[in-house]
Amino acid sequence: MGTDKKVLVKGLKYMGGALPLILMGPVVIHSSFKNQGHPFFIPVLGLGIIFCVLAILLMFLGLRTIMKSLFNS
């Protein structure tokens, strides 16, 4: 039983893609709440929520792919 290196690298790419979104999402949401009177409050808040949801999705896909590479024969 060995590790499938190509699938492992794919999973690590998912995790690497999620890393900037993990950092950007809360920053954008915090920024939008600091400027609630601005006319772009709702679009910026929506963008921050989308970043957070994408980060969660990419983390899930990355972990699932890494587990698949480690435990599938």
Image (cartoon, rainbow, N blue to C red):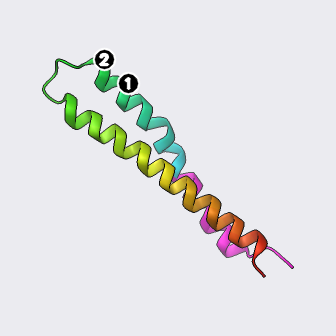
Point 84% across, 77% down: residue: 2
Q: Which mark is residue 34?
A: 2
Q: Quadrant of the N terminus?
A: bottom right
Q: What stretch is highlighted in magenta?
A: 1-17
Q: How many labels does the image show?
A: 2
Packing grade of label 1 (10 A; few <14, some 14-19, many >=20) is: some
Q: Judging from the image, what secondary structure is the residue with disc 1 in?
A: helix
Are the residues tagged 2 and 1 within 8 Å (C-beta)? Answer: yes
**In the figure, 65 relative to 73: above or below?**
above
Q: Farthest residue toward the right?
A: 1
Confirm whether the magenta stretch covers residue 4. yes
CA distance for labels 2 and 1 = 6 Å
Type of the residue with mark 1:
His
**In the figure, 1 relative to 33: above or below?**
below
Confirm whether the magenta stretch covers residue 56. no
Residue with the mark numbered 1: 30
Point 20% across, 33% down: residue: 42
Packing grade of label 2 (10 A; few <14, some 14-19, many >=20) is: few
Type of the residue with mark 2:
Lys
- Magenta: predominant secondary structure element? helix
Say left or right for 52 vs 43. Answer: right
Give the percent coordinates (x, y) of residue 22: 50, 40
Say left or right for 55 vs 11. Answer: left
Give the percent coordinates (x, y) of residue 43: 21, 37
**In the figure, 56 relative to 25: above or below?**
below
Point 41% across, 29% down: residue: 27
Q: Farthest residue toward the bottom?
A: 73
Give the percent coordinates (x, y) of residue 11: 62, 64
Q: Which image quadrant for residue 5?
A: bottom right
Q: Judging from the image, what secondary structure is the residue with disc 2 in?
A: helix
Point 49% across, 36% down: residue: 23
